[in-house]
Image: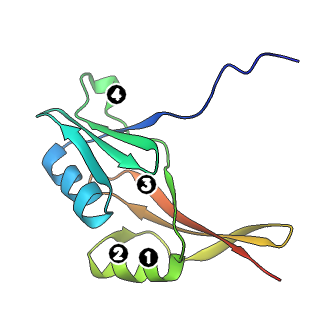
Amino acid sequence: MTKKVIQKVGQIGVPVQNLERALTFYQDTLGLELLFNTDRLAFLQCDGLRIFLSLPEKEEFSQSSSVIYFQVENLSSTYNDLKEKGVSFIDEPHIVGKMGNTEIWMAFFKDTENNTHAFMSEITIN
C-alpha cells in the first residue's frame, strides 16, 4: 500500500481582473468570510477551505480558474436568493446524476471575473 501523501485540499486560487469587485462578490454576495486582503490578493474562508483571490502576476496565470462546486443545503432557495442579488446563472438547478438513493443537483454561475462555478446539493430519496 502506498503512503498517503495528500491530506486535503487547503486552498483554491481564483484569478481575478478586479480584486475589489471580486471581493465584494465573494464576501458580500456569496457570504464567504474574509480572512485578510492586500491590494493584490484576498483570502476567504469556506468551511475550512481557503479561497485565494489574486490579480495574476503573469499573463499565463490570467485564465479562468477551475470550477469550484459550493455545496449548499437548499439549492432552490440559494438559486432564488442569489439570482435576486444579481448573480449571473448559466442554468437553472437541475439533476446531474444519481448515486444509489442520492440525487446530485447543480446550478452553474459566473462570478464577476467570468469564472464559472457551481452550487450543488445532494438530496437523499427514500
Q: Is residue 17 above or below residue 69?
A: above
Residue identifier under label 4: 61
- Does 113 sit left or right of 118 as displayed? left
Q: Residue 114 carries which label?
A: none
Give the residue furthest to the left.
Answer: 39
Q: What amino acid does circle 2 point to?
A: Leu
Percent of width and height locating residue 5: 67, 19
Q: Tags 4 and 3 in contact by the CB under 8 Å rule?
A: no
Q: What amino acid does circle 3 point to?
A: Thr
Could you tell me how far apart the alpha carbons at marks 4 and 3 are, in whole angstroms? 16 Å
- Does 107 sit left or right of 101 as displayed? left
- Does 106 sit left or right of 26 as displayed? right
Residue at 34%, 69% in the rendered image: 88
Percent of width and height locating residue 78: 44, 76
Q: What amino acid does circle 4 point to?
A: Phe
Q: Is residue 35 above or below residue 97?
A: above
Q: Tags 2 and 4 in contact by the CB under 8 Å rule?
A: no
Residue identifier under label 1: 78
Q: Tags 3 and 2 in contact by the CB under 8 Å rule?
A: no
Q: What amino acid does circle 1 point to?
A: Thr
Residue identifier under label 2: 82
| Marks 3, 2: nearer the viewer | 2
| Marks 1, 4: nearer the viewer | 1
- Residue in front for this viewpoint, 88 or 19: 19
Could you tell me how far apart the alpha carbons at marks 3 and 2 are, in whole angstroms? 15 Å
| Marks 2, 4: nearer the viewer | 2
